[in-house]
Image (cartoon, helix red, strand yellow):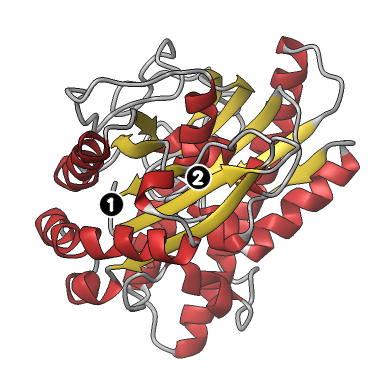
Amino acid sequence: MSKKPLILGIESSCDETAASLVTENCDGNPVILSNVISSQTDVHKNFGGVVPELAARSHIEKIDLIVQKAIEQSGKKLGDIDAVAATAGPGLIVCLSVGLSFGKAFSAAIDKPFIAVNHLEGHALSPLLNSKINFPYLLLLISGGHSQYLSVEGLGKYKRLGTTIDDALGEAFDKTAKLLGIEFPGGPQIEILAKKGDSEKYNLPKPIFNKGGCNLSFAGLKTAILLISKKIKTEQDKFNLAASFQKTIEEILKKKTEIAFNKFETQNKIKEKVLVTAGGVAANKKIRSMLTALCKEKNYKSVFPPIELCGDNAAMIAMVGLEKFKLKQFNNLDHPAKPRWPLDEDAAFLKGAGVRLF
């Protein structure tokens, strides 16, 4: 039996330092041998958000130990590694540079190929770590930095159907949590508080709800939360606002996903209709439940990564590296860090003032 490729993945695009070793089984499906993640919550919580310089410093302090731990937990030896894959973008440039530089140096030291990975491609393909899915499929990518609908046609083949024209959904969750006085990272706590509140208490805006196709907008919603939060007097008010926010997000995503379904079906020849939801916000159980019900109604298969693989991790980076390794898609050691690196590089830039939607 021929040796299966073994890929070391490294991730440092924001505030998680992560390393993972991934191989494949006899059927060609990826197998995670180790997946080590070091969070920086304690580093940033007093600032209410990620401080890039502190994040980079923490990556520098931990990355050697994290990679060593991933190798030890995998049960493999240094000489077993066939390639090193590291996130090259998008993300915070000072953070990306740490993992990228370490990955390049590591690959040179063991004289094995280096593979630069798009962080978003890791999220886009992450469900392949636990599900067998055929291309093409519709992807809803919702995270702290990105909110997009994409047609995924294969490795490196993406067509954007819709995107946020201002803020990402994960950012909207985090900012709402901060306005409600929830300690960073507060986004995941919104769903918990919402269970105690009345979702009908506040009628929140749904920007570009009835126009713009499946493009998204959350800036106006954040402004509304800011104004209402100044009038909050009781804990119950806080719960009610969290519940109203959660409900509004679900309503926005439901309508926009229905539009994305139609656009996806128009543009592709589809044997099986599949919606993949990935990114950190995909861990929100209420959003998962809503999308699962919508998929059942529209005859789509609904697929999510395991909750532990929704956030930033190196297993998804190693998995993309594995697929690129099999195609001999290697990169030179002078490959730059790319703070902005869209999956569909041909898509128009739709962010900021002056964007016109019809």
Q: What residue do we see at 25% from left, 77% from top?
A: 42
Q: Earlier in the sequence, mark 2 or mark 1?
A: 1
Q: Position of residue 313 (x, y in %)?
A: 43, 54
Residue 260 figure quarter: top right
Q: Is residue 72 above or below residue 319?
A: below
Q: CA distance from mark 2 to mark 1?
A: 15 Å
Q: Is residue 82 above or below residue 95?
A: above
Of residues 6 and 289, the one nearer the viewer is 6
Name the one closer to the observer, 69 or 150.
Answer: 69
Q: Secondary structure at mark 2?
A: helix
Disc 1 secondary structure class: loop
Report the residue marked by disc 1: 14
Residue kind at label 2, given as amino acid type: Met
Q: Which residue is mark 2?
A: 316
The amino acid type of the residue labelled 1 equals Cys
Q: Indicate the position of residue 83 as horizontal and vertical percent values.
A: 39, 35
Q: Residue furthest front?
A: 1
Left or right of 40? Residue 310 is right
